[in-house]
Amino acid sequence: MPKPGLRTLVRHLRPAGRGEDERAVIALYREYHRPLLAFVARLVGGDRQWAEDVVQETMIRAWRSAGRLDGDAASLMPWLATVARRIVIDDRRRKDARPQESGDGPLESVPVPDEMETLLHQVVVSEALKSLSPAHREILNETILRDRSVNDAAEALGIPVGTAKSRVYYAIRALRVALEERGVTA
């Protein structure tokens, strides 16, 4: 048997007059807030704020759907629980569809390459190259920096291939010594 006031409550939920609306919504809230909140809190794993939001949204939907509610039902709780469960499911789907938000905390611990170290190495190598003879700098420029074979470098420089090979060998040895003098080791 339905509660005596349920039929009246559902009838008054239907938009009629502003004063009746407010009283009906307040009565609905008083009657079902606690049991619905307890139900929703279990659905959302105890998140009180989320549970309150779901209950509020459920009450709004009950008011909007007043014309479809059965005033002869023993209780509105089954309908309210179904609506609340669907709201929770929709919220979860919405959260899963969106990338997880992150604060600044995790980003602070991400290692950032130190570009000063790279710049320092470039300066040291540049200084070491300047200390080589022009012939050694020229052959290293052709073979290493321009990525040419010894034969192509010899042709570009107009020197015999054998001379180019020996210059590469001695230029690399001289560069290694110049770098070691500057504190760079392999």
Image (cartoon, rainbow, N blue to C red):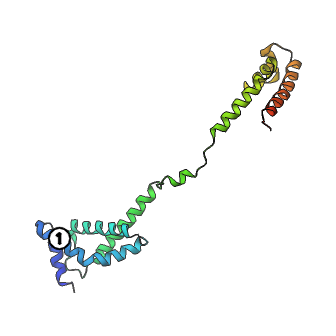
Instruction: Work out whether 92 lies above or below 153.
Output: below
Q: Quadrant of residue 161?
A: top right
Is 151 situated left or right of 66 in this image? right
Residue at (17% x, 84% y) in the render: 4
23 sits left or right of 119 in the view: left
Can you say which quadrant of the picture contains the C terminus?
Answer: top right
The quadrant holding residue 72 is bottom left
Residue 162 shows up from this direction:
yes
Locate the N terminus by quadrant: bottom left
Q: Nearer the viewer, residue 88 or 180?
A: 180
- Quadrant of residue 141 in the image? top right
Which residue is painted at 22% across and 67% down in the image?
Answer: 65
Judge whether 168 appears above or below 155 on screen: below
Q: Nearer the viewer, residue 18 or 118?
A: 118
In x, y percent, where is residue 154? 82, 17
Give the residue at x 38% y 63%.
90
Does any portion of residue 144 appear in the rendered image?
Answer: no
What is the total number of numbered labels drawn onto the structure image?
Answer: 1
Residue wearing tag 1: 13
Q: Residue at x 29, y 77 (%)?
A: 77
Q: Is residue 26 left or right of residue 79?
A: left
What's the amino acid at mark 1?
Leu
Q: Position of residue 181 (x, y in %)?
A: 81, 32
Q: Is residue 76 above or below residue 17?
A: below
Which residue appears farthest toward the bottom when viewing the image?
1
**Which x, y percent locates residue 13?**
17, 70
Label 1: few (<14), some (14–19) or many (≥20) C-alpha neighbours in 10 Å: many
Secondary structure beneath disc 1?
Answer: helix
Given the current orientation, which residue lies at the most extreme top position?
158
Q: Nearer the viewer, residue 12 or 70?
A: 12
Q: Position of residue 132 (x, y in %)?
A: 80, 22
